[in-house]
Amino acid sequence: MRKIPTFFWEYRGHDIPDPDLTTYRLCVEGAVERRLALSLEELGRRLRRVEIDRRFYCVNGWSLKALWAGYPVADVLGLAGSISGAAYLRTTSLGGYEDTTAIADLVADEAMLVTHMNGAPLPPARGKPIRLMRFDCYQFKGVKAVARLEVVESCHPGTWEKVGYSDATVQPYPHLAIDCDQELMPESRVLASINGPSSGEENAT
Ligand SMILES: Nc1nc2c(c(=O)[nH]1)N[C@H]1C(S)=C(S)[C@@H](COP(=O)(O)O)O[C@H]1N2
Ligand SMILES: [Mo]
């Protein structure tokens, strides 16, 4: 199996979570009228499913296109009823990765809570069982393996913002395009395409 070319937080000494789906709950809390802890089955029963064929971009210079399916973030927040005045959503993963974004931006960009990629449930490395995705900005604003959605009053820097990434606007320079898992390139080749040929050996596993 080839390694997913990414530079994500879980590769820096953290484990990739592999939650038990029978006990998994998506928690929606903070400034909401109703705190929720939703199982995957409840999400499926209470929300309309949406599908989108979109490419996402990583700030490290690569992009990945797939068919994503799940639920609109706006609809999940609608179930909880957000209280006016609290304008941000703080999303935290099971492993602790986090992002905070204005709810208005998530709604305007039709951000999704994705459960499936190319017709199959998300595997652990891709964010099992739910990942928050917003396609109109760099995907460090997305959160894999979502544990908690919290409606909050102020913006709190997310995991990548804490290390200095402030602008999530996708830049116009070319990003290495990956179109399906079979075509994934080993991470070192991605690095080579960014840094030139001398940056390390093949590490496909
Ligand atoms: N939980 C979690 N979510 C995360 C990350 C992470 O390290 N942990 N990395 C982010 C970044 S920087 C990117 S580019 C994408 C990578 O998604 P992928 O692993 O499916 O390629 O997930 C985003 N969400
Ligand atoms: Mo990224």
Image (cartoon, helix red, strand yellow):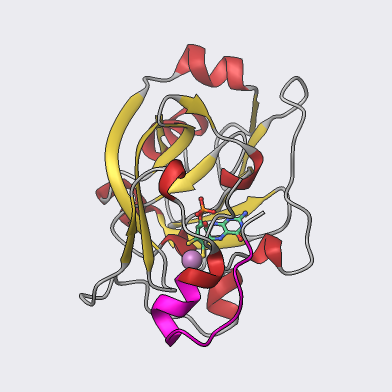
- Give the residue drawn at x 59%, y 31%: 34
Q: Is residue 102 left or right of residue 151?
A: left
Asked whether residue 156 is in view, the answer is no
Question: How many discs appear?
Answer: 0
- Residue 44 to residue 199: above or below: above
Quadrant assignment for the C terminus: bottom right
Question: Does any portion of residue 79 appear in the rendered image?
Answer: yes
- Residue 199, magenta (yes or no): yes
Give coordinates of residue 117: x percent, y percent. 44, 34
Q: What residue is rendered at 48% in x and 55% in y?
A: 142
Percent x, y for residue 7?
57, 68
For residue 27, above or below residue 164: above
Using residue 12 as the reference point, say whether residue 77 is left or right of it. left
Residue 102 in the image: x percent, y percent?
Answer: 40, 60
* Quadrant of ligand 1 in image: bottom right
Camera-nearest residue between 179 and 54? 179
> Would residue 121 be counted in the magenta stretch?
no
Q: Position of residue 116 (x, y in %)?
A: 47, 30
Identity of the residue furthest to the top in this view: 45
Magenta range = 190-203
Name which residue lies at 52% across and 61% down.
5
* Image quadrant occupied by the N terminus: top right
Judged left or right of residue 187, residue 69 is left
Q: Quadrant of residue 20?
A: top right
Horizontal side of 50 relative to 58 (left or right) equals: left
Residue at position x 59%, y 68% in the image: 202
Relative to the observer, which residue lies in front, 80 or 69?
A: 69
Residue 26, image quadrant: top right
Q: Quadrant of residue 158?
A: bottom right
